[in-house]
Structure formats: C-alpha cells, structure tokens
Amino acid sequence: MFGEDHVQKFKNILLSNSTVSRRIKNMFIDIEATINERIKISSFFSIHVDESTDVSDLSNLLVIVRYLNVNELEGNLLLYYPLIKICTGEDIFNAIQGYFCENEMDWAKCCGDCTDGGKSVSGCYKVLCGRFRIAAPHVTWSHCCLHRQSLAAKPFPDSLKEVHYMPKSIPTLTDFHIF
C-alpha cells in the first residue's frame, strides 16, 4: 500500500518481547518521575486511597493523587500496590509512607485524603485516617463521592421506610411505672 521503502522501514523496527517490555518499563519510569516531580513542585496535593479487588479476587491498593500543575488541577494514579494479606489501615499507611519516603515527598503539602469510609480506613488512631492525621495534622478527610453515590442509590430496607407516630407531648417520669 505504501511501497517497498515503507515495508523495509517496518522490518528494521525491533519488536522482540524484551524490546517491547524494556520500552514499556522505560515509559513507566519516565511517567512516574514526571508525576513525582510535578507533585514536589506543586504547593499542595491530595490523595484518594481505595482498595480494589480484581477479577482473580486479589486485593490491590490504589492511590490517586491530585495536584496543581501550571495553575490547573491534575489527577493521576500515584501508586498501585498488591495487598497480599488482609491489611489494616496501618499496613496501608506504611505502604504509602514507604513510597513517599522513597520518592522524597513531603506530607506537609498533603491537604486532603479521600477514602471509602471502611473500618480499616476511617477512625482515630490505628486506622489509615488516624495515621494520616499524625503525619500531617492539617489534612482533611472526605468520603469518596463515588461511594457516597452508591450508598445513596441503594434501596432502603423496609424498616427504614416506616414512619412511626410520635406523641405530641414528651413523657415525664410520672408517666412511667417503676416496679
């Protein structure tokens, strides 16, 4: 279709498994370095932490970061970490902390974290949000909007739909019989 000269150019392109794999790895390293550099330059960033289960029933930690890049908010996948065992919020925090230390990221620039509100992430001390508050006391927590929408879309059980009649007057101690 293009002629013999184009066919020869395509034949000269190396496409072995190791070449393609190396090129993909080099692109990943470049993209990761670019994102990390933008986060370091940005005056603030926020993270969204979520645990996801893939089709083979393996849990994965996903950390998405939002930061200011040339006066525009940008969001990217920061960390993908397989969770081999059942992890506590502290384990998840240690994985994120390890990545931050390895890439010299500053917790002081983190202004917010967003999670799904599960037991391992919401709480005061040992869980993920508690550990975030220790690392960066000014961090504000918010519940993930996707999870909020899914909670709102769930059908209510019948017991929550029932409205019970409440008396207009408030009972006093004399209304109750003590046995």
Image (spheres, rainbow, N blue to C red):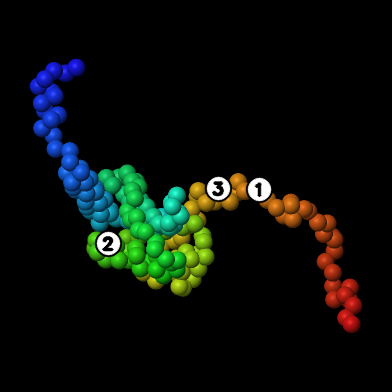
Residue type marked 2: Met
Residue drawn 18% across the image and 46% down it: 18
Query: Nearest the camera: 126 or 164?
Result: 126
Q: Which residue is mark 1?
A: 155
Measure the C-alpha gap from mark 2 to mark 1. Answer: 42 Å
Crowd class of label 3 (few under 14; some 14 to 19; many from 20; radius 10 Å): few
Whether residue 118 is situated above or below residue 148 in the rendered picture: below
Q: Which residue is mark 3?
A: 149
Residue drawn 84% across the image and 72% down it: 172
Q: Quadrant of the C terminus?
A: bottom right
- In the image, which is nearer the foreground, mark 2 or mark 1? 1
Measure the C-alpha gap from mark 3 to mark 1. Answer: 12 Å
Measure the C-alpha gap from mark 3 to mark 2. Answer: 32 Å
Residue drawn 35% across the image and 58% down it: 81
In the rendered image, residue 153, in percent from the top left (x then y), is placed at 60, 46
Q: Earlier in the sequence, mark 2 or mark 1?
A: 2
Whether residue 5 is situated above or below residue 175 in the rendered picture: above
Work out whether residue 23 can be spotted. no
Give residue 44's quadrant in the image.
Answer: bottom left
Q: Secondary structure at mark 1?
A: loop
* Label disc, if present, on residue 105 of the rendered structure: 2
Give residue 17's quadrant in the image.
Answer: top left
